Amino acid sequence: MSQQGDPRRGDPDPLIGSGAQQTSVLSDSGAVDGTRRPARPVWNSGADLGLLVLRLVLGGTFVAHGCQKLFGLFGGPGVGGFADVLAGYGYRATEALAWVTGATELVGGALVVLGLFTPLAAAGLLGIMVNAIALKWGNGFFAAPGGGFELELALAAMSAALVLGGPGRAALDKGRSWFRHPVATGWICLLIGIGVGLLFFLLLRT
């Protein structure tokens, strides 16, 4: 005897019912009618943890250098000593420049570690490294023996990577407007960082 439903009794045909339910499920999910919203981005452990490591190393390095310049910690010269170093490189307004450089390294590095205002903070660090690269350009690439710019280039590239790539989801920037639109924000901040670094080099040296 057939197991299909009897239309005279109002029994649904199980085959037809199954197909209708399947169509309904697909329609609800948006796979059929094309109205399904894009899935929210999920945690990418590899990329996000990699960016976290990058932020901790880069930001921590600049925090340490900022403490050297501002407070004389970790064997650093302090503001007065760093101003003398800048004067030796031919810069003007060396005390003000020493304060600005040290504060940018300290505050910018701390913000990078936290992942807060990351594009702008990393752009500030990038500007300092662009200035240093321009200063050491004539010494060649390798740090030894001529005092080249290889370390500054590595730090500049790390800073630029954060400016363009963002801080990752393990950051206080998560959900902010510049986090949701990283490409536009990144390029603007990248140009600002490079431009300010070159302006300091060109305008503040005798």
Image (spheres, rainbow, N blue to C red):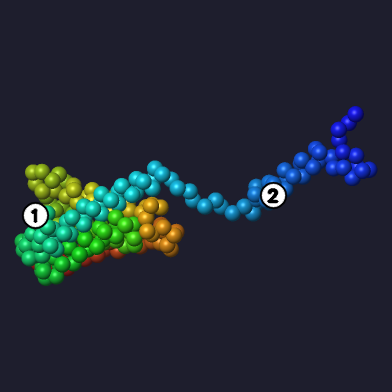
> Which residue sits furthest right?
8
Give the percent coordinates (x, y) of residue 135: 14, 57
Q: Count of labels shown?
A: 2
Residue 60, image x and y in percent? 23, 53
Image quarter for residue 62?
Answer: bottom left
Q: What's the residue type where badge 2 is placed?
A: Ser
Give the secondary structure at mark 2: helix
Residue at the spot of label 2: 27
Residue lying farthest top? 1
Earlier-in-chain disc, 2 versus 1: 2
- In the image, residue 11 sits, relative to residue 204, either above or below, namely above
Amino acid carrying label 1: it is Gly
Q: Residue at x 49, y 51 (%)?
A: 41
Disc 2 to disc 1, C-alpha distance: 67 Å
Q: Who's the residue at 13% across and 46% down the image?
A: 143
The answer to whether residue 75 is visible is yes
Quarter of the figure with residue 166: bottom left
Give the image location of residue 193, x and y in percent.
27, 61
User: Mark 2 or 1, which is nearer the eye?
Assistant: 1
Q: Say few, some or many: other residues with alpha carbon within 10 Å of mark 2 (under 14 / 14 to 19 / 20 or more).
A: some
Do labels 2 and 1 touch, CB within 8 Å?
no
Residue at the disc numbered 1 = 75
Q: Is residue 86 visible?
A: no
Q: Mark number for residue 182?
A: none
Q: Nearer the viewer, residue 114 or 206?
A: 114
